[in-house]
Image: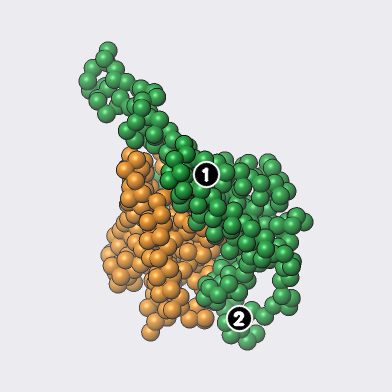
Amino acid sequence: MLDEPFSRGASRLHLADPRCKLVAALAFAVCAALLRSPGPAALALLTGAALCLWARLPLPRLLRRLAAVNVFVAFLWLFLPFSLPGAPLLRIGPFPGLPDWLAPNWLSLTATDAGVAQALLVTLKSNAIVLAFIALAGTSDITAVGHAVARLGLPDKLALLLLFTWRQLHVVAQEYHRLRTAAKVRGFTPGTDLHTYRTYANMAGMVLVRSFDRAERVGQAMRLRGFAGRFHMLAEPAGRPGDRLLAAVIILCAAALLAADILQPLAGLP
Amino acid sequence: MHISEGVLSPAVLGAGAALAALGVATGLKRLDYDRLMTVAILSSAFFVASLIHVPIGPASAHLVLNGLLGVMLGWAAVPAIFVALALQALLFQFGGLTVLGVNTFTMALPPVLCFYAFRPMLSGPSRLRGGAAFACGFLSVGASALLTAAALALSGEEFSAAARALLLAHVPVMFAEGVVTALVVSFIARVRPEMLAFTSTAHG
């Protein structure tokens, strides 16, 4: 669960400097988030897919990841098509045969073209950003991202917090899994009752207590070894000469999409 | 619930990013290097808590425990939540770069407020403690859901129905979260009472 399936690989994107990739990912995400028309949004989705293709990411894992991300988008599809005025596409109700208390007025819904277009736009943008993010940020491991964050000029405390959290996450998760296994072999089956809640609360509490103790120990060990607020890296992560150019091209593509989106209504295009 | 990328309006995204940056900066300023490891481990515990699914009737919801984190960490909860959300974005692509600010703000503001409201009661006598802990969990998740719904509703008229549904779906979660938070606090109070007084001793 806590592995990084996309971080291993030998594509050009995997080898690039994580700093350049992070900046490019941020620029792409911001530009794509600002899009307002479906044409440029579809192009952004194509760009994201092309980046994933270039990174030669494992397709089954990628699709599973996308499915998980689209749960929220699916939730919006339940509401958005019915929420905007426009030309009706699909009418649900009113139900003349049924009594009023069973089918009140608000139950009759109308899906409009504007609503469907809005839902489609959100879907395109969301998936475009996620694909580009996986291809750019996901192709570095999190340790590399943490160091890149510090070298991009963000507060070093924040970068350290990210690195420490990532390191300890596995330990804490193991702790939790061990407690859960122990509960399971003792015949614990969750249900909606106080016993279940108490069991989960005790598990969470135990994880917190052990984590807290571990934090004290690790903190002492680090002070003992002379930790004074920075990691010394044995090897500077080596990028490739063309990394900045690569990032610049991606940023330019994203900016071009945004420009097309803004200029489209002015030029009178559909 | 995390809002995914590409949904919110630019104004909401920008405001969320600015407010979150302010909160993270404040939290980091009050956090010295000695406590960094403790905050990191509690942040990862917060992350792991979100992997615990608690059944609520036929459905289930994952624990949030952001109220508990706020009461234990105070302002440092903001960078802790930010880092946990950033890792979730990197690992699972829940949320993402542009919505990281909004998600951090909606998840971290209520816990910091709870810290000021309920902190004295939690380290006080046990009679008050249960109620205060319940209120922490209940109100933190409720206020987070409210802020998330507000972020959606402010992004456009068309999102208001979804925002209302989101808020409604969180009502049972609020009760579950309140009960679990109260039970976790009573567990910690029995097993390791000094953890509840952690922030006050650290600040002297």
Distance, label 1 to label 2, CA atoms, is: 42 Å
Of all residues shown, which one is farthest toward the right? Answer: A10
* Picture quadrant of residue A147: bottom right
Disc 1: which residue? A41
Label 1 sits on what residue type?
Ala
From this view, report whether residue A269 is shown above or below residue B83.
above
Counting from the top left corner in percent of width and height, residue A94 is at 29, 20
Badge 1 and badge 2 in a common chain: yes
Counting from the top left corner in percent of width and height, residue B105 is at 39, 61
Label 2 sits on what residue type?
Arg
Of all residues shown, which one is farthest toward the front? Answer: A267
Residue drawn 36% across and 63% down? Answer: B109
Q: Chain of mark 1?
A: A
Q: Nearer the viewer, residue B11 or A234?
A: B11
Q: In terms of sequence position, does the residue under pointer 1 or pointer 2 come before the other?
A: 1
Colour applied to chain B: orange
Q: Chain of mark 2?
A: A
Counting from the top left corner in percent of width and height, residue A176 is at 56, 57
Disc 2: which residue? A230
Counting from the top left corner in percent of width and height, residue B82 is at 47, 64
The chain that appears green in the image is A
The answer to whether residue A187 is visible is no
Residue drawn 72% across and 58% down? Answer: A14
From this view, report whether residue A68 is shown above or below residue A232.
above
Residue drawn 41% across and 54% down? Answer: B10
Q: Secondary structure at mark 1?
A: helix
Q: Nearer the viewer, residue B172 or A269?
A: A269
Q: Secondary structure at mark 2?
A: loop
From this view, report whether residue B161 is shown above or below residue B18.
above
